[in-house]
Image (cartoon, rainbow, N blue to C red):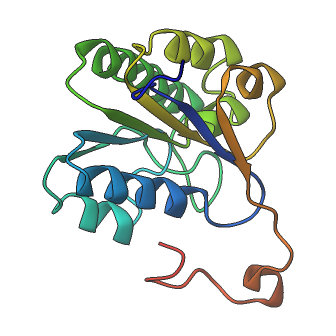
Amino acid sequence: MTKTRQGLTIIYIGDGKGKTTAAAGLAIRAAGTGFKVLYLQFVKGDWPSGERDILKKIPNVEVKLMGLGFVGILGDRKPLSAHVDAAKKAMTESIKALKSKKFDLVILDEAISAVESKLLEVSDILKIIKSKPEQVHLCLTGHKRIKKLIDMADLVTEMKMIKHPYYQGILAQRGIDY
């Protein structure tokens, strides 16, 4: 017998562009069907974000920016401990949101990147996944394949970079990259 509503754990990973865009598209689709959505960003900080700007305007979508920005790149001068504290707060907020059952879909953009940047441990992300109620959908994004996380997921999509304009000297483009 199949279940009509089974909360999925979805992971978008890879070195290619499109993970955050896929997560934002998922938020739009879910909100369009009446789902209540939390879109929580772990790392990106107040860097301009077209997807975040539009998601804030969509009914049934709540956006929370928890990160302090990219860690150790793009002029980051914050101590690692400040980034770690922000990631731990994002983790606590994620678990609280999942357990509240207020949301049908919780998207944790760059949660896996928080592990890659040594802000959280894999066990922290596993704790988030394990706190997910059965009917709630959960989506996480990041770069690296982490076997323990992939094993816990129902759906994993990898974005693979074939070519990137950055390596041709072209910087990130507003409306395309952010």
Q: In the image shown, does 73 or 54 lie closer to the viewer?
A: 54
In the figure, 56 relative to 125: above or below? Answer: below
Tell me what residue is drawn at x 25 percent, y 52 percent: 33
Measuring from the top left, give residue 156's x and y in whole percent: 70, 41
Measuring from the top left, give residue 32's x and y in whole percent: 25, 57
In the figure, 28 relative to 68: above or below? Answer: below
The quadrant in which residue 81 appears is top right
In the figure, 66 relative to 132: above or below? Answer: below
Tell me what residue is drawn at x 41 percent, y 29 percent: 4
Q: In the image shown, does 36 or 123 lie closer to the viewer?
A: 36
Horizontal relation, residue 24 to residue 172: left or right = left
* Residue 178 in view, yes or no: yes
* Residue 49 in view, yes or no: no
Measuring from the top left, give residue 165's x and y in whole percent: 74, 85
Horizontal relation, residue 170 to residue 44: left or right = right
Tell me what residue is drawn at x 64 percent, y 84 percent: 171
